[in-house]
């Protein structure tokens, strides 16, 4: 049985190629020749057909191309660990998140991205890590990474404001000064809005409702409000322990009653 049941969308697959992909360990020249968007498209088709291992291998080729070209399309990069999870390679999938993080850290170190951009990317990674953990039914971890993603978004805004203020200070052009001042002021208003209580409730309620632990909303809301007092100096290890403790206490009470 060949892997392909139909040609790639918008791409004609000649009959001579159809049997090449039966061996999932073989990275064929055909796949190597495809562009990243085409590889993503094909991986999604394979996933839909439940060829999860092959889909992950196709995404691995896409990853290598993106790393080589220093592409920062996180929506593409973060598909790979999720596909690894689908084909039963959860540890490899989890470690891939940290590989992506390490890569982004190197970009920031080389001044290819700003600290604000790095934190924005990290918030996106943490959000997908939350989904990964939800699939594993690791629900305390799900909430931790949801909360971490939210905090990293705030930290990204915080450092962007600092960046705009530094630019305002360094430039001698009055028009640019006004522009940077406006951007920092706008950022401060948005940062304040993002920390509003209704934003925190919305951020927490969605995953808690989905995993069936909505009664924990008040406890996690209080933890979030307390944690935000420490921005920008967040101790994620302590935060993770606190999230786990709230979850464990609720579970124990639930078992008693």
Image: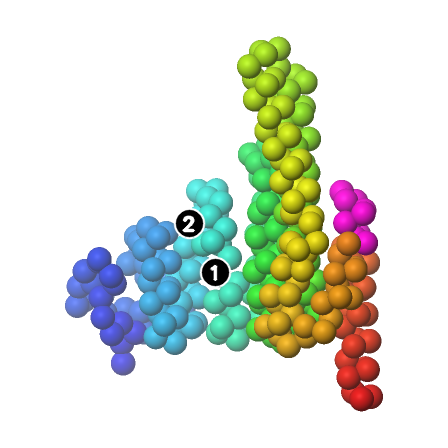
Query: x, y (%) of residue 114?
Result: 60, 35
Residue at x-position 35% and y-position 53%: 37
Question: Which quadrant of the figure contains the N terminus?
Answer: bottom left
- The magenta-colored residue range is 226-235
**Residue toward you, 83 or 211:** 211
- Is 54 situated above or below 37? below
Q: Is residue 181 magenta?
A: no
Which image quarter: residue 222? bottom right
Question: Which quadrant of the figure contains the C terminus?
Answer: bottom right
Residue at x-position 61% and y-position 51%: 123
Whether residue 156 sits left or right of residue 58 in the image: it is right
Q: Is mark 2 in CB contact (under 8 Å) with mark 1?
A: no
Neighbour class for label 1 at 10 Å: few (<14), some, many (≥20)?
some
Distance of label 2 from label 1 (alpha carbons):
14 Å
Query: x, y (%) of residue 183?
Result: 59, 29
According to the picture, the residue beneath numbered tag 1 turns out to be 79
According to the picture, the residue beneath numbered tag 2 turns out to be 65
Coloring applied to the structure = rainbow
Whether residue 234 sits left or right of residue 96 in the image: it is right
Query: x, y (%) of residue 61?
Result: 41, 57
Which image quarter: residue 106? top right
Neighbour class for label 2 at 10 Å: few (<14), some, many (≥20)?
some
**Residue toward you, 9 or 66:** 9
**Element at badge 2?**
helix
- The mark nearer the N terminus, 2 or 1, is 2
């Amino acid at each position: 049985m060949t892997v392909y049941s139909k040609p790639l969308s918008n791409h004609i697959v000649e009959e001579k190629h159809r049997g090449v992909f039966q061996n999932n360990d073989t990275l064929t020249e055909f796949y190597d020749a495809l562009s990243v968007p085409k590889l993503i498209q094909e991986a999604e088709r394979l996933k839909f057909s439940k060829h999860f291992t092959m889909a992950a291998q196709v995404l691995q080729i896409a990853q290598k191309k993106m790393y080589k070209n220093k592409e920062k399309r996180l929506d593409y990069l973060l598909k790979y660990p999720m596909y690894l999870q689908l084909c039963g390679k959860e540890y490899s999938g989890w470690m891939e998140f940290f590989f992506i993080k390490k890569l982004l850290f190197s970009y920031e170190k080389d001044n290819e991205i700003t600290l604000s951009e790095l934190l924005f990317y990290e918030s996106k990674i943490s959000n997908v890590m939350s989904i990964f953990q939800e699939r594993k039914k690791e629900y305390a971890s799900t909430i931790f990474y949801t909360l971490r993603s939210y905090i990293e978004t705030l930290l990204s805004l915080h450092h962007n404001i600092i960046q705009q203020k530094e630019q305002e200070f360094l430039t001698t052009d009055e028009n640019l000064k006004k522009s940077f001042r406006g951007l920092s002021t706008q950022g401060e208003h948005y940062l304040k809005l993002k920390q509003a209580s209704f934003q925190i409730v919305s951020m927490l309620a969605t995953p808690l409702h989905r995993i069936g632990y909505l009664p924990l909303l008040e406890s996690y809301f209080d933890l979030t409000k307390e944690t935000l007092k420490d921005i920008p100096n967040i101790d994620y290890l302590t935060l993770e322990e606190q999230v786990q403790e709230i979850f464990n206490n609720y579970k124990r009470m639930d078992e008693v009653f």
